[in-house]
Image (tube, rainbow, N blue to C red):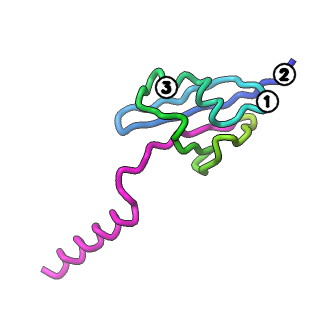
């Protein structure tokens, strides 16, 4: 009989988030845990096959084997490039200071 480990799968939107706790067999990958969690029933827009996954804020491959207590995080695609957003914000601040 296979041993099981306790893990969590998390996903968040601006106004709604969920953390699903589950027990999986040892050797389960991050993607497999996300699939087994049922989180796509709460968030139908998640595309697990193409989503970036992480464990405690560190991006991992979908094939990453989980350990006891890991929290798999499903990341949403970025709407805007963070570097470009910072550049635009700095430019607006500079423009306000010069007025």
Residue 29: horizontal and vertical position, in percent? 70, 35
- Disc 3 crowd rating (10 Å Cα; few below 14, some 14-19, many 20+) is some
Q: Which residues are the magenta region?
A: 70-99
Where disc 1 sits, the SS reads: loop
Residue on which disc 1 sits: 26
Mark 2 or 3 closer to N-term?
A: 2
Q: CA distance from mark 3 to mark 1?
A: 22 Å
Q: Residues within 10 Å of mark 1 (few under 14, many from 20)?
A: some
* Quadrant for the C terminus in the image: bottom left
**Which residue occupies 45% across, 23% down?**
42
Q: Is residue 85 above or below residue 74?
A: below
Could you tell which of marks 2 and 1 lies nearer the N-terminus?
2
Does 39 sit left or right of 60 as displayed?
left
24 to the left or right of 21 = right
Q: In this picture, is 75 found above or below 83?
A: above
Q: Residue at x 73, y 31 (%)?
A: 28
Q: Which mark is on residue 2?
A: 2
Side (left or right) of 87 relative to 58: left
Q: Residue furthest front?
A: 49
Quickly name the residue at label 3. 40
Residue 92 in magenta stretch: yes
Task: Give me the C-alpha separation between circle 2 and circle 1.
Answer: 7 Å
| Percent position of residue 85, x then y | 33, 63
- Residue 71 % position (x, y): 62, 37
| Mark earlier in primary sequence (3, 1) | 1
Where is residue 76 shown, x and y percent of the image? Answer: 45, 43
Q: Quadrant of residue 24?
A: top right
């Amino acid at each position: 009989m296979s041993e099981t480990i306790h893990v969590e799968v998390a996903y968040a939107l601006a106004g709604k988030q969920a953390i699903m706790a589950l027990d999986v067999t040892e050797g389960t990958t991050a993607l497999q845990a996300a699939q087994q969690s049922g989180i796509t029933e709460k968030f139908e827009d998640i595309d697990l096959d193409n989503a970036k996954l992480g464990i405690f804020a560190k991006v991992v491959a979908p094939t990453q084997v989980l350990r006891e207590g890991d929290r798999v995080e499903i990341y949403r695609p970025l709407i805007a490039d963070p570097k470009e957003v910072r550049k635009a914000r700095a430019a607006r601040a500079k423009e306000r200071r010069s007025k």
